[in-house]
Image: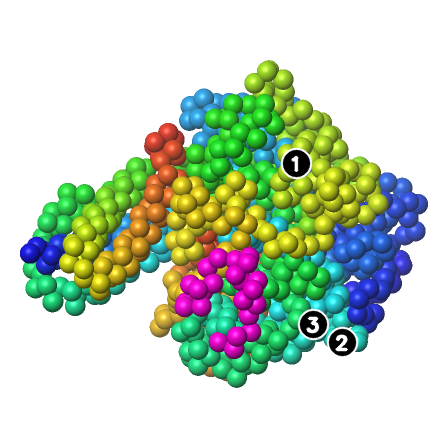
Amino acid sequence: MHVGNYIGLVQSSEQQLANAFAQVADHHGDEPDIYQVCQTLSGWSQQHVTDLQPLVDRYAATKNDEPDRLSQTLFKEPRSGGLALLRDLHDLYLLASEVELCWVVLLQAARGLRHQELESRCEEFDKTTKRQITWLMTRIKQAAPQTLIVAE
Amino acid sequence: MEQTRDSITDIWGERTPHFGDWPVRVDRRTTAEPDHWVQSACVLCSNGCGLEIGVKDGCIVGVRGLDRDPINHGRLGPKGLHGWEANHSPDRLTKPLIRRNGVLEEASWDEAMSLIVERSKAIIQQHTSLAMGFYTSGQLFLEEYYTLAVLGKAGLSTPHMDGNTRLCTATAAAALKQSFGSDGQPGSYIDLDTTDTILHVGHNIASQHTVLWMRILDRLAGPNPPKLIVIDPRRTFTAEKAHIHLAPRVGTNVPVLNGLLHLLIEAGQIDQTYIDAHTIGFDELKKMVSSWTPERVEALTGVSADQMREAARLLGSTKTLVSSALQGVYQSMQATAAAVQVNNIHLIRGLIGRPGCGIYQMNGQPTAQNTRETGADGDMPGFRNSGNPEHMNQLARLWNVDVRKIPHWSPPTHAMQIWRYAEQGSIKFMWISATNPAVSMPELARIRRILQKEDLFIVVQDAFMTETARYADVVLPAAIWGEKTGCMTNVDRTVHLTQKAIEPPGEAKSDLEIFVDYSRRMDFRDKDGAPLIKWDTAEGAFAAWKECTRGRPCDYTGMSYEKLRRGGIQWPCNDEHPDGTSHLYTDGVFHTSADDCEAYGFDMTTGGAVTPEEYKANDPKGKAFIRAIDYEPPHEEPDQDYPLWLTTGRLVYHFHTRTKTSRSRALDEAAPDSFVQIAREDADRYGIAEGDLIEVESRRGRVIEPARIGDIEQGLVFIPFHYGYWDDPKRSRAANELTLTEWDPVSKQPHFKYAAVRIRKASAADERELVADQAGLFPETGTNTLNK
């Protein structure tokens, strides 16, 4: 039974994502939207970390440091220059996708276990993660042409 | 001089009580007897009052309201009766100016236009047209915006075009799209003549739309007067007349509206048949608002639970309802979310699409609706959807260009983002027409830094040497209202023709002429090598625009200049509705079907875009969206260092940054200077007396204003946003020195209505020190010597 393992993985991933959104909010505060939206989205992930705790306790999940390595690879240090925002959004997208994939995996397990509560919690969490991904995609599409073609 | 009333001391004039037909009252003010009158409409707010311009010896000598006009029935407000004086102001720009060795000098049109074209071509060659940005207005005419939109989208191929309408009415458009699938106000001003109840949310209509307010005052004085509910944190002229005035804390519109929706649903005062037949999303709304009990609303917003219940009883029992919203909603936290809740009240009660039931998501400026319709803002012409390939193909066929020329890979760039790109240096050319960002944008110190950038080439097209024009590389003198012909569309979709009455001063040219000239000089052509812009005159542009609107919600195909000379017409006007349309959605079918909608919608909290695939999977097929949203606290709240809330707004005597209104003597004298309004309790706490100079400081800047005490909630300070520096460079006084660079995630409208500030009594030394603070202004050396 590895459900606990994945619950630990997703909780750590959400923590990494919360930290990364907060970090991007701080680094790109001069954009008209980044600070406020990234703060909000960081809050969503932080809320997931809290809400997951009962499941973590129940399945005796152990802290998984795999996501740590992922975010260290992605966000090594603050980036600057015209490309920085796009690259940071790009990495947020990858981190958020990691979380999203965890929900898919857990959801499958919940269905196999016919575990109603786990299933509905995962669906609920997944909805929020998808909203984060939708915003990231919208913003990336907007930034891409200007960044790649004109920015210095 | 002849005037029918003194509109400065008596803003709304005598009552003509009514129910049903609103009586005619012709307001007139002329300084000499005109030798002829020219039909037009007023451009000093978004109401769109029909008027006639009195002309004598080639000069405007006054105006009178048009008695047969459906909007005003002859009435005019103080700005309309006085604002025309600006046309003959001695400081009109009459010749093009070019910056040479740091100084703006007179030049010929050919020199100025050649320079603009030469720089455009050089920048495009080196950086592509993504380095070209346009920032326009809510003041030009439809024909001018459409010409600009075509040359920008199909000539240059740049997505960077927006209007200052982003600052005033973007949320109106966003809320209409989010609820009904397309821009366009459902109701009509005639709804006010019979309605039982009126709800104003963040809309000080008595000051902002004085003639529309006269219509309401006349109802209040007549038989069967309507009940009036006003939601506004200040005790405004409007609030004084309210039967119920809810005064929420700044930034809490959503909890108040969610609380009202909750009470309506809880009491069963909803039209379930309408909800089932014509809407989607009601269950989510019901769930979302269920936690907003009157007690919880009271604790958060300061509006008492009893008042909430009283307002809900009225909204729940009324058989007809007119609602309006303006900047108190649009420029505040959760702007689109709050505006949509106003729509929701109408949808869940089925109060839409019939006489007496209207929603006015108000506009701030006279032609803001046209900026949105034509795509001179961050939209596509004719309310087309940039994500819908068929809509883009329609434009490509219409303009006879390759569809890939039209920048539709992502939504057009919004104003604040355009300025951000300029700040970062990826936009290198900015053409600013008929607007004054150096006073009207948030966080002015930052805007001035951008305007001063060496690598940003700035063209300013205006009638006056505004605070913004002083930073330009080229200044083009523009003809204004009364000196050119064109159409404008007001809040209730009424199109007016405004006609040329006099010649523009000196060498000034109409904006249309300037844009056409630029397009010809840039040699923009269609696929077959013919000129892209196929018109030279306003009427020619109007004919092209009509074709662009064919089959779209804003259908103009049934209109003509000749028809418009007989009076205003409400779109859609086509073969089916030759006399126009007073109410949209009479059949409960909205513009939400996937092939029709103007946008696929956005996440209300993040602004994340719904994809075409997602939208089509749940195609609402004509049902309206009921969208639920929970409260979110503002991002900047008062704290120990900045303990007060700042809110900004407008005065009855001025329009925008006073470019025209301060050049009318009576309007200027009625409100000559800025001020800061504070509560009596705060005045006592800080030892401030009426008229004392106060320094107001935020994290972004500071201003010094004389104090005005009373009629405002404790803890809140108010500064009108109109005042800049052109006529008084000696004191830092523009409210936007203090405001935030932050926007609503859906409408991208900046948040002007809240910021944390601190205040203290100012000394003379503070005042002197602050002169230097107005970066870019050098009062000691005169006006035109600004170095870049």
Q: Residue at x 22, y 59 (%)?
A: A119
**A27 sits to left or right of B22:** left
Closest to the observer: B262 or B272? B272
Q: Marks 2/1: CA distance?
A: 41 Å
Asked if the residue under mark 2 is in contact with the one under mark 3, i.e. CB atoms within 8 Å, the reply is: yes
Name above or below for residue A140 compared with residue B760.
above
Tell which subunit mark 1 falls on: B
* Residue for point 9% across, 53% down: A65
Q: Could you say where residue B41 lies in the image, as x and y percent from the top left?
A: 77, 49
Residue B4 quadrant: bottom right
- Label 3 neighbour load within 10 Å: few <14, some 14-19, many 20+: many
Please tell me which residue is depicted at 58% across the width and 26% down the height of the picture: B397
Q: Nearer the viewer, residue B765 or B773?
A: B773
Secondary structure of the residue carrying numbered label 1? loop
Under circle 2, the secondary element is loop
Residue ID for mark 3: B196
What is the crowding at mark 1: few (fewer than 14 residues within 10 Å), some, or many (at least 20)? Answer: some
Question: What residue is disc 2 on?
Answer: B224
Q: Position of residue B545 (x, y in %)?
A: 67, 34
Magenta segment boundaries in residue numbering: B266-288
Pick whichever, B106 or B271, lies toward us.
Answer: B271
